[in-house]
Amino acid sequence: EGDGLHVDWDAPFDPPPSLDDAWYVYGVVEGSPTDLRELFGLEGVALAEVRSEELAAIGHPCPASPYASDDEEIVISWVKAHDAVLKQAMQMYDALVPCKFNTLIKADGGAPASAVRTWLEQNVDDLRQRMAKVRGRREYGVRVFWDPEAVRTEILMEHHARARAEHDHAPAGVRYLQQEQERRVFAEMYLDRRAALRARVLAELHALVEELVEEHRDPSDGSDATVLRCACLVSEAKTAGFTSAMERVQATEGVGVQVSGPWPAYNFVAQAVGGGDDR
């Protein structure tokens, strides 16, 4: 935020009325000027660059209030259009720092493009650092999962015969205590096996990715099928190795892997320019 300039990176859906014009920003890019005539944004609006030396903000003029609708499907279509622009821009420029949906730069009475250029100039050092972080890298989402009931059944089958033999020859009171102990041991074995799989995958990933952000699961949701969910920043040079590592995990009996991407690096550089992205 500079003199006469307000950057609203995380604007609410019900902003106060404003007559000021603004510039909708999809992301900040690095590279040579690019013809964007074949690239369209929200509601089919034509896109343009606002440049300051080697950096440019891609977007278009818009009203000073964010895109808002009571229709959830319309909002979802806007978010998808925003993301589609960024995915295409990744292929067109040397590096891309993505912005969150509804990122606006507002100009108080001036031209929106001039406000954007001023913002780029004021934040050039920070943006260059972020560009350096993502240049030659892409974000991928990874989800590793298994069938919890199948794993529990496998553990039960491994230890059922031993437990039953012990219970059959014990007094009733002792048998109850043995059964309770077995239940605790069973739960510990399940958690140990889950932790071992998670540790194995993380070890594979840390050897290949530039950075990793793990999404910690809420245990209250009642589901433990997902063993690991994370976002990975992967260099182009290590993409093949990353893919091979995930295929090795996928080959493990009873284990599934979902890899999504490449995505704009929301989870690694977007916090200061519009917030992160939930995949």
Image (tube, helix red, strand yellow):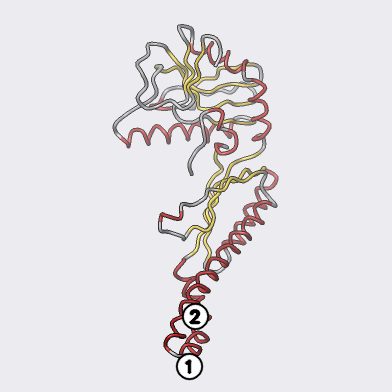
Viewer-proximal residue among 262 and 278: 278
- Residue 77: x and y in percent read 38, 35
Q: As shown in the figure, which amino acid type bears the numbered disc 2?
A: Met
| Residue marked by disc 1 | 169
- Residue 24: x and y in percent read 46, 22
**Is 1 rendered above or below residue 82?**
above
- Residue 156: x and y in percent read 48, 78
Farthest-out residue, bottom: 169
Q: Residue at x 56, y 13 (%)?
A: 2
Q: As shown in the figure, which amino acid type bears the numbered disc 1?
A: His
Q: Residue at x 65, y 20 (%)?
A: 124
**Is 16 rendered above or below residue 38?**
above
Q: CA distance from mark 2 to mark 1?
A: 20 Å
For disc 1, the neighbor class at 10 Å (few under 14, some 14 to 19, many from 20) is few
Viewer-proximal residue among 235 and 44: 235
Which comes before the other along the chain, label 2 or label 1? 2
Q: Which mark is residue 94?
A: none
Q: Residue at x 67, y 26 (%)?
A: 128
Where disc 1 sits, the SS reads loop
Farthest-out residue, left: 70
For disc 2, the neighbor class at 10 Å (few under 14, some 14 to 19, many from 20) is few
- Residue 231: x and y in percent read 57, 46
| Residue marked by disc 2 | 157
The total of numbered circles placed on residues is 2
**Is 176 rendered above or below residue 32?**
below
